[in-house]
Image (spheres, coloured by chain):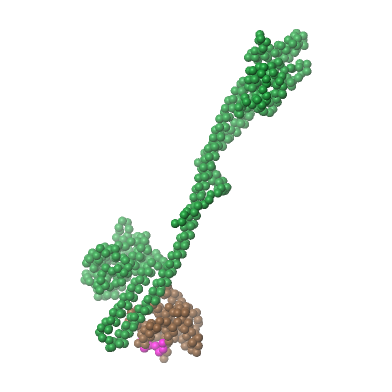
Amino acid sequence: MKGIPKKISKFDLRLFLTTLKSSITHFSLILTLLFSLTAILIFTYFITYESAKEQILDVGGEMFTKVVKDVIGFMEMMDTRVKAGEITLAEAQELVRTYVNGPKKPDGNRDITKSKMSVDDYMYVWASSYKHDRGTLTMHPFNVEGANKWNYQVKGHYTIRESWSNLNYTGRVFRQLWKNPGEPVYTFIAYQQYFEPWDWIVGCGGRERIIYERRLEGLRRKFLIVAAIFLLISVIHVHSFTRVEIARRQREEEVRDLNRELEQRVKERTAQLEATNKELDAFAYSVSHDLRAPLRAIDGFSSALLEDYKDKLEKEGKTYLRYLQEGSHEMSGLIDGLLKLSRSTRGELSQERTDLSAMAATVTEELRKAEPGRQVAIQIAPEAEVFADPRLLKAVMENLLGNAWKFTGQRIDARIEFGVEQQEGEAVYFVRDNGAGFDMAYIDKLFLPFHRLHKAEEFPGTGIGLATVLRIIQRHGGRIWAQAAIGEGATFYFTLGEGGKHS
Amino acid sequence: MKSRIILLVEDNPKDEFLTLRALNKCRLANEIIVVRDGVEALDYLFAKGDYAGRNANDLPTVMLLDLKLPKIDGLEVLRQIRADERTHRLPVVILTSSDEEKDIIAGYELGANSYVRKPVAFDEFTKAVAELGRYWLITNEPPPRK
C-alpha cells in the first residue's frame, strides 16, 4: 500500500473563523463569557470611577472651598480691621500667616505641623488668590520657602480641575518636597519619579483623597490583572482549540482523500475483475465449441467405422473402436463438468425464494425415471425455503442427491434423506444416504476437483461435481462439510449464510 | 410433391460429413445444400455472388445453422436473414456445440426457431439429426412459398 498522502497545512481564514465561531459554542464559551463579564466590569468600573473621581473632586473641591472660604474669610476679616484702622497691614498679614501657617517657632521658622492647611491647600488658595485679585486686597503668595518658584505650577494647579494631567503635581509630592525646606524645587520632570504607573493625580487634596485614590488604585490594578489573565487564558484556549479543530478538519480531509483514493482503486480493481471475467467467458465459450468438435469427430468416425466396416473388423478391432468411443465420452463428460464448474463462479448471483424441498423432490423424481428398476426409500423434509440462486442450487441438489443415488446403487435397502437441522441458531441442510460411504481419512480431498475416492469401475464420475458444489455454496456465503464411514453411508451438510434462514 | 431442401451451414468438414451421413440415412431430404461460412450462406439465400443465377424465391425448407463460422458468424447471419422480408420466416435450427446460456438467449432473441446442441456421442448425434430432419421436413408446416 502506498504511503498516506500528506497535505501541507496553510492558514485558512475561513476555517479559522468557523472554528473560532464553533469554539465559542463549545467549552471555551464559559471563558469567553467570563472575559466579557470582566471587560464589562472594568468598563463599568472605569465609568463609575470616573464619576467617582468627579465626586471625589467635588468632595475635595468642597473641602478646598471650605478651607479657602475659611482663609479668605479670615483675610477679609483682617482687611476690614485694617481698613478700620484697628490693625496695620503688617499685623494683618502676620495674623493671616499665623492663622494659616501656624505660630512662629522661637527659631523663626514656622511649625507647619500645626498648620491648618497643607501645602496643597496653600497652593489652592494661592491660585484662588490669583483669580480673585481684588485690587485693594492684593493677595501675595504666602511666604512659603521656595514657593515663589512654583509660580507656573500654581498656574497649572489652577487648571488641574479641567485637565487631569498627572504630571504637574500632586499633594503628596509637595508634601514631600516640603519635608526638605530650603532644598531647590525639583523640576517638572523629576516629579515623575514619585509617581507609580497607576497613580492618578486627581488634584491637590488632603490626605483622605489620596487614600481614596489608593483604594481605588488597588482595586483597578487587581481588575486589570485579572482581566489580563482572563484574556490571556481565553486567547490561549481559543488558539489551542482552533488548532485542534484545524487538525481535526485536516484529518477529516485526509480521510476523505484516502476514501477517494480507495474508491478509485476499487473502481480499477472492479474493472480488472470485469476484464478477467470477460476473458473467462471467452475461454469457456471456446472450450464449448473448440474442444467438443474434435471429440465428436473421434466418436463419430469410430461409430461410422464400426457401422460401415463391421464385417471387415475382428472382435479386437471392434473393441478398440469401442474404447475410442468411451474415451471420447469420458472427455466429453469432463468438459461438461469443467464448464459447469466455471459457470458456478461466473455470472450474477440472483437471490430468490427457493423451495429446496420441492427441488429435492424434482431431482429424485428425475433419478427414479432414469433408473426405474431401482428401489430407493426417499425422505424429504417439507418447506425448506431458502433465499438463493435457484439455478445454482439446482446444480447442488442434483449433485448431492445424484451422488447419494449413485453410491447406494449396490444396496437393496437404499435410503436417501434430505432435511434441515438447527445447529447453534443456524439452519443446516443435509443429504444423507446409507450407501458406500468413504474413508474420512481423505476428507481433505473430497472437495478438490478431479480427485476421486472410489474406483471408476465401481462408481463412475468425473470428480468435478463436489468442487462445483463447494464453489456454489461458498458464493452464497455458506459452508459445506461431510461425515461418512465406509460401508455405512455419508451425510453432506451445508449452510447458506444469510439466505439459509429456516422459514 | 413438396421438394424438401435442407441448407446446412457448417464450416467443419468432419461435422459436415457426419451430419450428411446421418441425414442421408434417414432418406428424408431431396437435396442437401452445404455452405461453409456465413457469407456463402447469405449469398445462397439472397442469390448473390457465386449463387447469382439461383432463383431467390426457391428457399430451403429448413436451415441448419452452426454458430461458430468464419467470416460472418451464425448469429450475424441470423440477424440479416430475419431483417430481410424474403427470408424473414425461413425456419432456422441452430445446431451448434455451444450450450452457453448467452448463445441460447441470443439465438432465440434473433428469431431462431429451434436450438439444438450437437452431442459428442455419435449415436446421439445421429438420433438428433434424424429427429430434426423428420420434424422439420415432415411434421412441421413450412411457411408458404410466394
- Screen quadrant of the C terminus of chain A: bottom left
Residue, x 33% and y 61% (percent of image)? Answer: A479
| Residue A143: x %, y % from top left | 71, 15
Span of residues in magenta: B26-32
Q: Is residue A216 above or below residue A439?
A: above
User: Is residue A64 shown to the viewer in this render?
Assistant: no
**Percent position (x, y) of residue A453?**
26, 68
Q: Is residue A1 left or right of residue A112?
A: left
When the figure is inspected, residue B102 is found, relative to residue A76, above or below; the finding is: below
Residue at image x 56%, y 48%? A12
Q: Is residue A190 above or below residue A28?
A: above
Which tint was used for chain B? Answer: brown
Q: Position of residue A259 (x, y in %)?
A: 48, 56
Q: Is residue B80 visible?
A: yes
Residue drawn at (26%, 75%) of the image: A372
Relative placement, left or right, of A191 versus A366 is: right
Q: Assess whether residue B49 is covered by the magenta stretch.
A: no
Residue nearer the viewer, B23 or A222: A222
- Check the rendered structure and report the hue given to chain A: green
Determine whether, in the image, residue A428 is placed left or right of residue A130.
left
Query: Which quadrant is home to the N terminus of chain A?
Result: bottom left
Q: Quadrant of residue B31?
A: bottom left
Residue at coordinates 76% horizontally, 17% vertically from top-left?
A138
Left/right placement of residue A352 relative to residue A371 reads right
